[in-house]
Each structure stands twice: as C-alpha cells, then as structure tokens.
C-alpha cells in the first residue's frame, strides 16, 4: 500500500519554504509512489512559482500532489503515515491529537534548514520532542555524509549536461525569456536580497574588457540595481546598458525554467536555500547571498559551507572565492575581490562541476526520507 505523507509548510517570508516543500512533495509522488498532501498557509507565494495554483481553492491537485490550504481555523483531517513539519513549523494541535489517536502512530519529522556546520551530522535523525507517544525526529539536509543530503530529482544532472551541451536548446530557451546576449558576452544571473555591495560589482562589470549580460529575476535586489543605473522602479522586461554591462529584468519563472536559466549562465548569484542548491547542481561557479539571521549567526553557516566547498581548491583560488563570498555577505568592496576571482576562473569553473559530482554521490533528500521511514517501520 502507498504510504501517505503530510507535509506542512508555513511561509515565513520569501520563497524558500514553499520552494523546498513543493519540490520535495513532487519528488515523493513522482519517484517514490507516495500519496502526498502539501499543506500551505500562503498560496500566493506558491502561485509565483506554480501559476496553475488557484489561490481560492482549499483543495487542488498539482502534478500528482494534493495541495491543501492550511487554514488559520483547522478543519479536521486524518493524520498521515509520515508527517513532515517543514522548518520547525508548529502543527495544528487538533492534527497532533489525530496523530496520537491513530492505531499506528505516524513517523513525525522536522525537516530542518540546510547547514554545512559540523554539528548537523550529530543531530540528524535524533529524537526531538514527544507528543502523547508520538515521537518527533530531526531530519537535516546537508552536504556531508551522515546528513539527509540535498533535494535532487532523478536524472537531473544528465538533463542539465545534455542541455549545457546543446547551444541551440539554450538559445531557444533564452529566447522564450526574451534574452539575447551579444556574441561573446558572459551571462550572469542575479537573485539576491538587498545588497549595498552590488554597486561596486556592477562598476567592474561595466568597465570590463568582456561584455556581460546580467539577468535579474524580479525581486528584492532590483532597488539596488535601479539605483546604480539611476533608474527608479525597474520592471520586468526592462533592458538597460551601461558600457560593457547589459542589465535585463526577468519575470519570476517556474522552478524548472529557473533551473534552465542557471544552467545557461556562466555565473549565478543565488540566495537562501533552494536556489543555492540549484546553482550547485548547475555545475557553474556561484555566489551565495545567505539569509541574514540575528547576531550574525548566518556568517558561521557561510564559513562552514566555504570550508567544505573550497577544501579541494588551491590556496590562492580558495582565498579568492572566500573573499568574494564574504564581501558579498558583509556588503564589502566587490570590485577587488571580483577581479581576483577572475584570475582563478578556470580552476573555480572546473571545481563547480567536481563539487556537483561529489555531492551527487550522496543519496538525495527525498530518498533519504523514504529510507528513514522504511527503516523506522
Ligand atoms: O526566497 P528565498 O530567499 O528563501 C529563503 C530561504 O529559504 C531562507 O533559508 C529562509 O529562511 C527564508 O526563505 C524564509 O531563497 P530560496 O531558498 O532560494 O527560494 C527561492 C525559490 O524560488 C527557489 O525554490 C527557486 C524559486 N525561484 C523560481 O521558482 N523562479 C524564479 O524565477 C526564481 C528567481 C526563484
């Protein structure tokens, strides 16, 4: 019999919460034959990446996933065999009662935020709190063996490689977005939070000997881009050029299209959690804008990832990459560090692919969750 899964997603802000849970839900259905209900409290955020979502409906099916609006006033629903509270969201108390009342209690997990820190390995799969005999477990995605791994659909890397080897397919895809980079221009994508360091980076890109086409999906960084260009209120479709730099504002597209955009680019600036992982699967050099946390604890997370990511790089290339990422995340001077990175480009470029292959050796997160459930039964 198919296992029934309930995934609870509370959209805190931005798109990472829904981005991760939607991806996971689809993969559990498509690759593991699970029956999945995805409970989402904010369907508007969901609609941005899946335009088929009807925000008025309390129940709908999308790509085999039963999408349920998680209402403020909970309506009774039977508990599933496996229950995932994404990112420590609090389940409705009535639902917790329903879990405890089942003949066979469900496997209850908290799917945590992604972190490369050491302690994650020690905490992954540990029991957490208990509610009336229902045990909750920590489940940590991660980069190291001994963690839950990363979301990666079956065949993703093969698809990505075939696409990257097919210039015509890439041109055709970019055309659908209205992107026509000039011959020889490097293509860079920029998805980030507000960042005062951006201006200095754009300064060097615009004065570089090589042309750059910068594509910017609609979002929080647009204000900084506009300020640098001296334009107020940039909108989707705008294309502006300053010297060697062309800036183009793109719409927010569905996740599959965003993947393809990342695969087309020579360099991807990404943020948060899910786009950060997708840029790694793109096998291209990347720059991470980490989600800011109180007391700068996000900077420890950044360092932990950098230590892992740069371990196989030469000391000089590693130093260049670390300096670039740290400048970006502390609104430092991006001009010098960008130029420095360019000196190590071939190595950093090759490393992006190596890192991707190394990460793909680990079981993906959906498989790890299914395996945990099977071993728990
Ligand atoms: O939107 P984010 O900043 O989300 C963040 C992080 O998850 C953070 O850890 C969390 O604490 C906070 O939200 C609440 O960045 P992230 O994680 O990359 O999510 C963006 C999602 O949007 C991802 O699934 C990719 C998707 N996306 C599209 O589908 N289309 C697009 O055009 C773009 C730019 C992104």
Image (cartoon, rainbow, N blue to C red):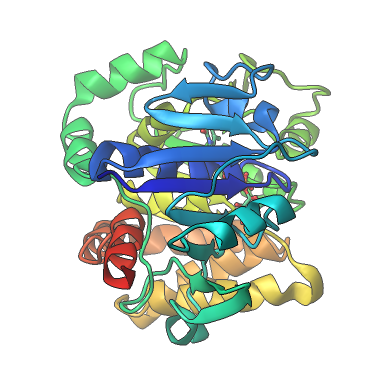
Residue 114, can we see it? yes
Residue 248, can we see it? no
Quarter of the image containing the C terminus? bottom left
Q: Nearer the viewer, residue 369 or 101?
A: 101
Quarter of the image containing the N terminus? top left
Instruction: Give the vertical position of 12 relative to 43 (above or below).
Output: below
Ligand 1 shows up in the quarter that is top right
- Residue name at image x 72 percent, y 33 percent: 222
- Residue name at image x 43 percent, y 31 percent: 65
- Residue name at image x 61 percent, y 14 percent: 237
Question: In the image, 236: left or right of 53?
Answer: right
Q: Nearer the viewer, residue 3 or 39?
A: 3
Count the labels in the image: 0
Q: Position of residue 208 (x, y in %)?
A: 51, 42
Question: In the image, 86: left or right of 12?
Answer: left
For residue 232, which quarter of the picture?
top right
Q: Position of residue 119 (x, y in %)?
A: 51, 86
Instruction: Give the vertical position of 326 relative to 62 (above or below).
Output: below
- Residue name at image x 64 percent, y 58 percent: 96
Q: Position of residue 278 (x, y in %)?
A: 41, 47
């Amino acid at each position: 019999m198919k296992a029934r899964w309930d995934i609870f997603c509370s959209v805190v802000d931005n798109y990472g919460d829904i981005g991760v849970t939607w991806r996971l839900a689809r993969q559990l259905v498509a690759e593991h034959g699970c029956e999945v209900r995805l409970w989402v409290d904010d369907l508007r955020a969901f609609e941005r990446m899946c335009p088929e979502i009807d925000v008025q409906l309390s129940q709908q099916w999308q790509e085999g996933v039963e999408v349920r609006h998680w209402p403020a006033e909970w309506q009774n629903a039977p508990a599933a065999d496996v229950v995932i509270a994404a990112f420590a969201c609090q389940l409705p108390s009535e639902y917790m009662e329903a879990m405890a009342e089942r003949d066979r209690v469900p496997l209850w997990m908290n799917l945590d935020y992604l972190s490369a820190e050491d302690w994650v390995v020690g905490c992954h799969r540990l029991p957490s709190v208990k509610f009336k005999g229902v045990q909750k477990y920590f489940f940590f995605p991660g980069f190291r063996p001994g963690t839950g791994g990363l979301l990666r659909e079956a065949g993703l890397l093969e698809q990505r490689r075939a696409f990257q080897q097919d210039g015509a397919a890439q041109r055709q895809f970019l055309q659908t977005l209205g992107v026509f980079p000039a011959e020889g221009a490097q293509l860079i994508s920029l998805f980030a939070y507000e960042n005062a360091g951006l201006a200095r980076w754009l300064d060097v890109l615009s004065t570089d000997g090589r042309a750059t086409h910068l594509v910017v999906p609609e979002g929080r960084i647009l204000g900084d881009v506009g300020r640098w260009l001296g334009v107020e209120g940039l909108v989707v479709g705008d294309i502006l050029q300053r010297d060697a730099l062309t800036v183009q504002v793109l719409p927010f597209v569905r996740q599959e299209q965003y993947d393809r955009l990342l695969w087309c680019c020579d360099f991807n600036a990404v943020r948060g959690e899910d786009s950060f992982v997708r840029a790694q699967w793109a096998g291209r050099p990347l720059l991470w804008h980490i989600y800011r946390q109180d007391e700068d604890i996000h900077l420890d997370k950044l360092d932990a990832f950098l230590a892992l990511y740069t371990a196989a790089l030469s000391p000089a290339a590693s130093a260049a990459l670390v300096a670039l990422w740290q400048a970006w995340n502390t609104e430092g001077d991006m001009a010098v560090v960008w130029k420095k990175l360019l000196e190590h480009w071939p190595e950093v470029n090759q490393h992006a692919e190596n890192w991707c292959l190394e990460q793909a050796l680990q079981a993906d997160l959906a498989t790890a969750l299914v395996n945990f459930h099977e071993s728990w039964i």
